[in-house]
Image: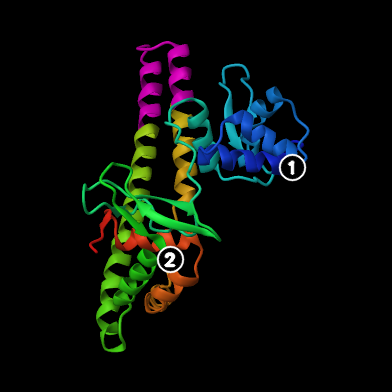
């Protein structure tokens, strides 16, 4: 079975919907600019079509209810992404606001706290005679304002303190191993939880079948319940396939972690704005108060 026309553009559509940056009509216009020839109605039908995640719909036949089964064709998106998009379209997940584009001259924007009034500092550029000058500043009347270039230099200097020196690397290694084990435990717990939920729904189907045989429920009640439980099981199984099994090369990961940690200042200095903000937020999960 082949993917419907415009499959790759619709793949982009799924990713954009999941990111919650634009509404559906804006995403369709973006896809059209990429060459997609599709009306609004057909695009809406397409992003509801499970064929993109490798499933096909089996219509109702006699006493058997309609179901979705795994097809033989290659999927172009994950089942997790497909169901995530369906939840957004169904209004079961709150859409996020459009993400703010961050100025590369202001990597510390929204991470700093005003030392005068305690509010989060924003940032902007002021036009000088020959060039633009960037500042971190408060949005209140307290008048707090810092040159961004100087603040960025001070932060880079502070960041170098986190780079472990050679004698201390043996101390950092057990710490990294401990936190790595803690993270993998979370993954294993998630697998166990999903398997437990699948077992619970399977047991509900058995109980419903037993009630049907005992004439405690009608055929319609049974098939409606069975369809609902099977759909829930299918979603859980798709999520389970997305959860990685514990099969890690702990030594390789630790070596990479130690290497990144030893080059933390360089990664920050030469990395893009996303890398810089990942480093900032990983070290300072709370807003950072700067004193001058």
Comes first in the chain, label 1 or label 2: 1
Tag 2 residue: 247
Give the position of the N terminus as an image quadrant. Answer: top right
| Alpha carbon distance from label 1 to label 2 | 39 Å
Report the front residue among 291 and 244.
291
Around disc 2, counting alpha carbons within 10 Å, would you say few (fewer than 14), some (14 to 19), or many (20 or more)?
few
Magenta stretch: dominant SS? helix
Task: Relative to 170, say whether 129 is above or below.
Answer: above
Q: Name the residue: 63% across, 19% down.
A: 61
Residue 220 locus on image (x, y percent): 47, 12
Task: Name the element at disc 1.
Answer: loop
| Extent of the magenta region | 203-228
The residue at the far front in this view is 129
Task: Relative to 84, say whether 269 is above or below.
Answer: below
Which image quadrant for residue 156?
bottom left
Which image quadrant for residue 151?
bottom left
Q: Name the residue: 49% across, 24% down.
A: 227
Give the position of the C terminus as an image quadrant. Answer: bottom left
Which image quadrant for residue 264?
bottom left
Tag 1 residue: 34
Report the front residue among 137 and 5.
137
212 in magenta: yes
Q: Name the residue: 27% across, 52% down.
A: 113
């Amino acid at each position: 079975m082949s993917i419907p026309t415009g499959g790759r553009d619709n793949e982009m559509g799924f990713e954009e919907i999941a990111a919650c940056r634009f509404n559906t009509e804006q995403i369709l216009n973006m896809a059209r600019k990429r060459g997609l020839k599709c009306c609004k109605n057909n695009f809406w039908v397409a992003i509801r079509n499970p064929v993109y995640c490798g499933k096909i719909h089996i219509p109702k036949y006699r006493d058997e209810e309609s179901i979705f089964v795994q097809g033989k064709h290659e999927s172009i998106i994950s089942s997790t992404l497909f169901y995530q998009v369906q939840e957004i379209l169904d209004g079961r997940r709150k859409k996020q606001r459009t993400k703010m584009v961050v100025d590369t001259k202001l990597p510390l924007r929204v991470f700093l706290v005003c030392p005068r009034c305690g509010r989060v500092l924003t940032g902007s550029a002021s036009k000088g005679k020959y060039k633009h000058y960037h500042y971190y500043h408060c949005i209140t009347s307290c008048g707090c304002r810092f040159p961004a270039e100087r603040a960025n230099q001070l932060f880079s200097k502070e960041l170098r303190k986190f780079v472990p020196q050679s004698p201390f690397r043996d101390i950092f290694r057990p710490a990294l191993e401990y936190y790595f084990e803690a993270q993998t435990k979370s993954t294993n717990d998630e697998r166990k939880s999903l398997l437990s939920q699948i077992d619970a729904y399977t047991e509900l189907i058995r109980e419903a079948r037993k009630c049907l045989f005992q004439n405690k429920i009608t055929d319609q009640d049974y098939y409606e319940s069975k369809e609902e439980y099977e759909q829930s099981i299918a979603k859980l199984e798709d999520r389970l396939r997305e959860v990685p099994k514990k099969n890690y090369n702990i030594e390789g990961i630790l070596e990479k972690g130690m290497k990144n940690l030893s080059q933390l200042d360089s990664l920050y200095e030469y990395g893009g704005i996303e890398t810089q903000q990942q480093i900032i937020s990983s070290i300072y999960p709370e807003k950072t108060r700067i004193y001058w």
